[in-house]
């Protein structure tokens, strides 16, 4: 976990030193491609995990329900906090 | 929306390939996701470091930001407790323990399997642990796949709350891509707070 953040800070330092290089400003596209690759690999590890695939039907339904509840609950809370406390600042 | 569909497509393709077993073992066993994640984090770092508004972003960190992890904890726990009404075989505290994983699936599933064994028995504890593993993986995947939608309909903080403990690493790139670079430190800060709360909350709900 901290390796990941360390690498990002190394990237920040590199980006800061090279901030006058015009091409670096357009790094958004390659980021999307890397996200696609990451999800593809994540799919492979889920599909190849026998424990998950074998128990998908009986336990998966309950897991899905809990996952949906947790995600929905926090998304709604995040929406509330955004509108109550953060909206004006982001409009500026 | 188009971005989300492409991401779902790549993920599904990966699932099918992994499941079909037609991939060479070397691909499945050597987990390359970590290295791709590192590459992604470096790219995210580059884009932040070269951003001309970096100083403004750093100056935007406020105590008010504690509200974001608070919203995540409150929203998740309230809705997990509500779901226990539907899942009659598990108690409300079992559901809260699963919800307290906040997408940190490895830690939460191991903790639940071990801590619930004395009270539920080996088999049921392992079942609840597996549910925790799957539910929290699903939460991470939902965040990765639905972030563009969350931003569109629920504002820029919503994917950060959905991502739970993962917003400091795995879901950070997609959040900064769709919520905006200026939220990168909010996302990391949120991930750290939620991450540290996982072991405490999971153990607490398992003990009830």
Image (spheres, coloured by chain):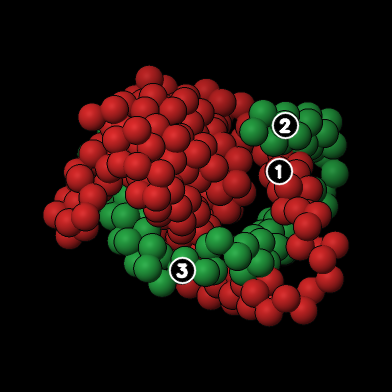
Disc 3: which residue: A56
Q: Name the residue under label 2.
A: A3
Disc 3 crowd rating (10 Å Cα; few below 14, some 14-19, many 20+) is some
Judging from the image, what secondary structure is the residue with disc 3 in?
A: helix
Query: Tag on residue B41?
Result: 1
Rendered location of residue B71, percent (x, y):
30, 37
At mark 1, the secondary structure is helix
Tags 3 and 2 both on a single chain: yes
From the viewer's perspective, is B59 left or right of B24?
left
State the separation of the CA atoms marked 1 and 2.
10 Å
Nearer the N terminus, badge 3 or badge 2?
2
Q: Quadrant of residue A77?
A: top left
Image quadrant in which the C terminus of chain B is located: top left
Drawn colour of chain B? red
What x and y, as percent, mark residue A5? 67, 32
Q: Is residue A83 left or right of residue B108?
A: left
Chain letter of the residue beneath label 3 in the structure image:
A
Residue B166: image tag: none
Nearer to me, B128 or B159: B128
């Amino acid at each position: 976990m901290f390796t990941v953040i360390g690498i990002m800070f190394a990237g920040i330092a590199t980006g800061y030193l090279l901030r006058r290089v015009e091409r670096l400003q357009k790094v958004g596209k390659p980021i999307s491609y890397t996200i696609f690759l990451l999800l593809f690999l994540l799919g492979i590890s889920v599909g190849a995990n026998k424990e998950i695939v074998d128990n998908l039907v009986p336990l998966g339904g309950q897991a899905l329900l809990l996952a949906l509840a947790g995600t929905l609950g926090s998304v709604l809370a995040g929406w509330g906090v955004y509108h109550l406390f953060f909206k004006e600042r982001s409009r500026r | 929306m188009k971005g989300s569909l492409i991401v779902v497509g790549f993920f599904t393709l990966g699932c099918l390939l992994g499941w079909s077993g037609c991939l060479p073992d070397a691909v499945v066993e050597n987990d390359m996701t970590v290295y791709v994640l590192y590459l992604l984090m470096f790219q995210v770092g580059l884009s932040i470091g070269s951003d001309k508004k970096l100083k403004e972003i750093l100056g935007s960190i406020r105590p008010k930001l504690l509200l974001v992890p608070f919203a995540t904890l409150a929203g998740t726990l309230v809705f997990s407790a509500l779901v226990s009404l539907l899942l009659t075989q598990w108690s409300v505290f079992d559901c809260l323990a699963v919800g307290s994983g906040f997408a940190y699936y490895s830690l939460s599933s191991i903790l639940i399997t071990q801590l619930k064994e004395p009270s539920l028995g080996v088999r049921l504890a392992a079942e609840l642990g597996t549910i925790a593993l799957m539910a929290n993986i699903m939460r991470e995947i939902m965040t990765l796949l639905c972030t563009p939608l969350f931003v569109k309909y629920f504002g820029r903080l919503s994917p950060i709350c959905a991502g739970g403990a993962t917003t400091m690493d795995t879901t950070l790139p997609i959040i900064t891509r769709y919520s905006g670079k200026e939220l990168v430190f909010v996302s990391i800060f949120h991930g750290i707070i939620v991450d540290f709360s996982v072991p405490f909350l999971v153990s607490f709900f398992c003990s009830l």
